[in-house]
Amino acid sequence: MNKKYNILALAAMLAMVSCSDFLEPDSESEFVPEDATSLNELLLGEAYQRNDMTGFNIFLSLLDDDIEAAPYQTPNEGFDGNKYLASYTWQPDMFEMMEEAGAGHINMYESYYSVILGANAVIDYLPEVNDTEENINKVKAQAYALRGFYYFNLVNIFGMPYSCNPEAPGVPLKLNSGIEESNDYLKRRTVGEVYDQILLDLHTAEECYLSLPESEQWSDNYRTSLPMVQLMLSRTYLYMENWEKAAEYAKLVMDNPQFKLVDLNDIPLTGINEEGETVRTYMVYPTYASTETIWPYGNVMDMFEWTYSGTNNINATTGEKMHAYFQASQELLDTYDDWDLRLSRYIVRAPKGNSNELMNMAFGKISVGTTYYLPQQNAVGVFGRCLRLSEAYLNYAEAMAMLGGDGIAEATAILNRLREKRFDPEDYDDVDFASQDELIEFVRAERRRELCFEGHRWFDLRRWDMPAITHVWHDKADESNSYRLEEADLLYALPIPDEALEMNPSLEQNELPGKRLPI
C-alpha cells in the first residue's frame, strides 16, 4: 500500500470513516513522517480521544439503573422528547429516533473507528521512520494502547458480554489503514476474537513501555502510559473472568508509587466561588490535580450533555429555568450510608427549576462550572473521564472475592483500605463478611458507589448477568409510562447504526427485539 498521506485529507477521511470506508487520499501535497516526533504529533491529532472531540459516549449514561427521569417540566418549544426517550427506553431504532428528534448525527460506531484508523496509520508508518528504538517504542506503545482501549469500548457497546457468550458477534477488526477491496469487506469477528486482539494490543503496549526508562513509563502529559495499560489489562481480564490475571494487573497499578487514594476528608464540603457565594464543593477526578488520576480523556459535554442543564436554559413559554431531564436514581442513592462522604462529594446537586429545592444530578466528579458547586482547587475541567486508581482497588477486590479461599481476606482488606478514605474517621468501621456470596454482593455495590457516572455501570450490568431494568418517563405533568429492559435482553448489545450497515454490505445487524412499548 502507499503509506503517504496528505494530512488534511487524512483528517477528512477520519471524520467520515466507517468500518469499510478506509480510503487512501490522492493529493499532490503529501505528509510523510520521517521520525517518531512526527508520528507522535499524528497520534495526538488523529488517534487520541481529545477533549475537543465528541460522539463517543453521548447517551450511554441513559441506559443503566443509576439514572431516572427528573420531575416533569414544561418542555421548551420545539423540544422532542424522543431525543432522550430513544436510548433511555432501549429502543431498537434509537439512532433513527434520535436523529429525527433533532439530536443530530450520532454514530459512536463511526467515532471509534475514526480514531482506530488514526492509530492504525501510525502503526503502519512505524517501520519506515528513522529514529532511536526508545523514541519508536514510545509511539508504538501509545498507538497499541489506544487501539486496545477503543476496541474494548466498541465490543462492549455493540457486542454481547464476553461472560455471556464469547462466540457471539462482536465488531470488525480493522488492523491497518489501507484500502479494503470491494469483495473483501470487513465482517464482524466474534466477541472472543476481539478480546484476543485487545489483549494482544495491550500486551504489545506493555512490552514497549517496559523497554523504556522508568521516567518515561508515566507522565502527567495526557498521554497513555504503563499504568494506564496495566489498568486496562486488569479491566479486560476481569470482564473475561480471568480472576488471577485481573488481580495481578490491578496490584501492579495499586503498588505504583505515582498514585495514591484521595482522602475525601480533605475535600471541604463548602467553598467560595468567583462571585463570593458559599457553594458546595465536589470532588473532580479527570485532572492530574487528583492523585488518583492515571489518564484523563474525552470531552466533558460528550459524557454529560444530556444529563446536565446549563444555568441559561430558560423555558421560552413560562420563563422558568429548566432543570435537567434526568437525575440520580433513588436506587443508587439508597446504596450509600448516610455518613458516606461520597454521597456529598460525588453527586452534584443543583436547583430544581426556579425552586430552592436541590436535585441530585445524574453526574459528578467533573468540572462544569461554579454556579452550584466549587470544583477542586487547581482542577482543569477540560476532560470528561479518566482511568483512576480506585478502579484498580475494586478490580482487585472483585477478582480476589471470586477466587475465594485466602482471596476473601485479601478482598476484604483492600475494600477497607479504600473505604477508610471515603468516611470521616469517627463514622468509619471496617467491613467483614460472613460468606463469599455476601462479599461478592458488597464488592458489586461498592463499585456502584465509587465509580458512579464514570461509564462503568452499564458495562458492569452486562457482565453481571444482564438484569432487568425499569425506566419511568414523564410524558406529562400527570402522566408517566414505564419501560422495561428484560433480563438478558437483546438490547444489552446496542444496534449498529444503519449508516454503517449501508456502507458495509458484510456487516450484520445485531438481533433486535420489536419496538419497546410502555408496560
Image (cartoon, rainbow, N blue to C red):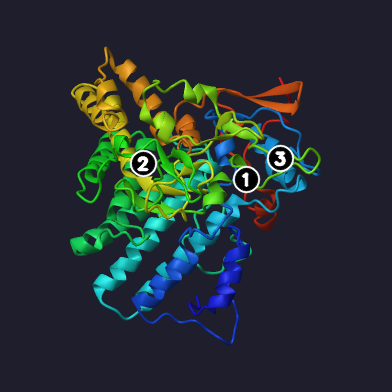
Residue 341 visible in rendering: yes
Q: Where does the image place residue 53, in percent across and percent down from the top left?
A: 54, 59
3D distance between C-alphas at marks 2 and 3: 30 Å
The three-letter amino acid code for the residue at tag 2 is Arg
Q: Which mark is residue 235?
A: 2
Foreground mark, 2 or 1, reads 1
Question: What residue is rendered at 31% in x and 45% in y?
Answer: 292
Amino acid type at mark 1: Thr
Q: Percent from the top left, x then y, of residue 185?
A: 60, 58
Judged from the image, the secondary structure of the residue bearing numbered disc 2 is: helix
Residue 93 numbered mark, or none: 3
Reply above or below: 17 against 253. below
Marks 3 and 1, how far apart in space?
Answer: 32 Å
Judge left or right: residue 244 versus residue 42: left
Closest to the observer, 306 or 436: 306
Real-space Cα distance between discs 2 and 1?
A: 37 Å
Residue 440 point in image, percent of width and height: 34, 22
The answer to which of 444 and 318 lies nearer the viewer is 318
Instruction: Indicate the quadrant containing the C terminus: top left, top right, bottom left or bottom right.
Output: top right
In which quadrant of the rendered view does residue 504 lie? bottom right
- Whole-percent x, y for residue 155 in the image: 50, 45
436 over 213 or under it: above or below = above
In-image side of 473 versus 392 (left or right): right
Q: Which badge, 2 or 3, is on the more N-terminal residue? A: 3
Indicate left or right for 1 with 38 as reference: right
Question: Disc count in the image?
Answer: 3
